[in-house]
Image (cartoon, rainbow, N blue to C red):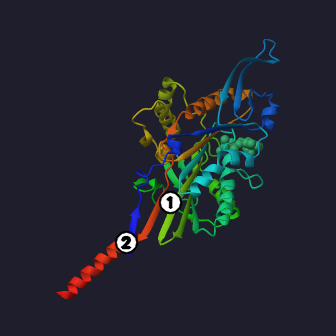
Amino acid sequence: PRKKLTLDPTQECTPNKGHSDRIRVYVRIRPISKKEKEVGARCCVKAANGKEIYLTEMALESDYLRLKRLKGRYFIFDGAFPENTNQEEVYRTSTEQLVEAVLEGKNSSVFCYGATGAGKTFTMLGTMKDPGVMVLALKDLFAKLKQRSSEGEHSVRLSYLEVYNETVRDLLSPGRALVLREDLKQGIVAAGLTQYKACSADEVMALLQQGNQNRTTEPTRLNETSSRSHAILQIFVEYSARVGVSLVSRTGKLSLIDLAGSERAIATDQRTLRSLEGANINRSLLALSSCISALVEGKKHIPFRNSKLTQLLKDSLGGSCQTAMIANISPSNMSFGETQNTLYWADRAKEIRTKGCVTNEEIQVPESGCEQLQLLLEVQKENHQ
Ligand code: ADP
Ligand code: MG
């Protein structure tokens, strides 16, 4: 008989180098689009030295023909990707180390944040020709598992879900709205969500493209797909191996999140925040900014329960998890306001500390020799009587 020895993930906390961990924040500038060029847009933002972002405010000169540069601002992040950065580079810098962590039985998340049209879906999902972080992470995960195949058994399952208008839906098996509930071991889970068993990255790309087709688009703005829906891909990696006489099993979860466009929901001051709340605009994004503020200010109570998205992101923002944020921005001076807003929140998010990563590990050991001896003695005693 085997005795089950469960390590409570909240107890077995091994913080990074003795300190709590920080959310890593990256900024990606997308190339200027044809449409932006046609209307005479100019670049108002520049990435330099791998980590720096320069934002310049511009104004029309009095003759209305030329743009002049007004004041500028400088930001520093964990990474700054200029327009020509390819998908592979974005993946390697922001996400690869998190895939490694998931293989070790840790939880990690990456989320893309920014205005509609800034490049979030391109970064996360990408195209068939130019796959993004979601697909590159799965490809890399399968490659890494192949290298470790002699070490033990692995299985990969995935779920793809959407939060739209405070309703959670399964993107792989569309239908009824799903209910969120708290699971002691896994945190917040969507009850009844499909878990798809994945064997190769290629089949996954088709699956995710299909899932993305199922994302809700705004009826009033048909040309703007998914600008108010948040898509979350969850990848679960299970590992089990025999170490001596014990059976070791680990589960890691990687969440990859494509957030809704932040332009109509994020306010940097309290007054605008209240008026937006009154208008009931994307409650999830508003709640996200409130949670970020509360976390940065070190508040005791973080209002995760205020929306579906923040409930689902609870363990990414405040839990024992490694998290990366990719802020997407357009280079155009016509998107200056949105870019400024995105950089403001990205800059704040840098201050968020998570509790450091824990390993979700379970070890089953055979009953000890001592207990077996005890049992033997008891049997002998019984026989005697
Ligand atoms: P969002 O999801 O933030 O609304 P998208 O990812 O849909 O924005 O990007 C808007 C458009 O810009 C799309 O046509 C997309 O293909 C293109 N685009 C975005 N980022 C890049 C990039 N880094 N390189 C090339 N094209 C991009
Ligand atoms: Mg999108």
Report the residue marked by disc 1. Answer: 193
Identify the secondary structure beneath mark 1: loop
Task: Describe residue 287's horizontal placement relative to residue 200 as left or right.
Answer: left
Report the residue marked by disc 2. Answer: 368
Total numbered circles: 2
The response on whether ligand 2 sits within 8 Å of label 2 is no
Q: Position of residue 31 (x, y in %)?
A: 77, 38
Question: Mark 1 touching mark 2, by CB under 8 A?
Answer: no
Task: Describe residue 19's horizontal placement relative to residue 257 as left or right.
Answer: left
Task: Select label 1 or label 2 by which is in front.
Answer: 2
- Label 1, label 2: how many angstroms apart (C-alpha)? 40 Å
Residue at (69% x, 27% y) in the render? 336
Q: Position of residue 215 (x, y in %)?
A: 60, 51
The residue type indicated by label 1 comes to Leu
Around disc 2, counting alpha carbons within 10 Å, would you say few (fewer than 14), some (14 to 19), or many (20 or more)?
few
Q: Residue reaching furthest top? A: 62
Answer with the quarter of the image where residue 383 lies: bottom left
Tell me which label, 1 or 2, sits earlier in the chain: 1
Ligand 2 shows up in the quarter that is top right
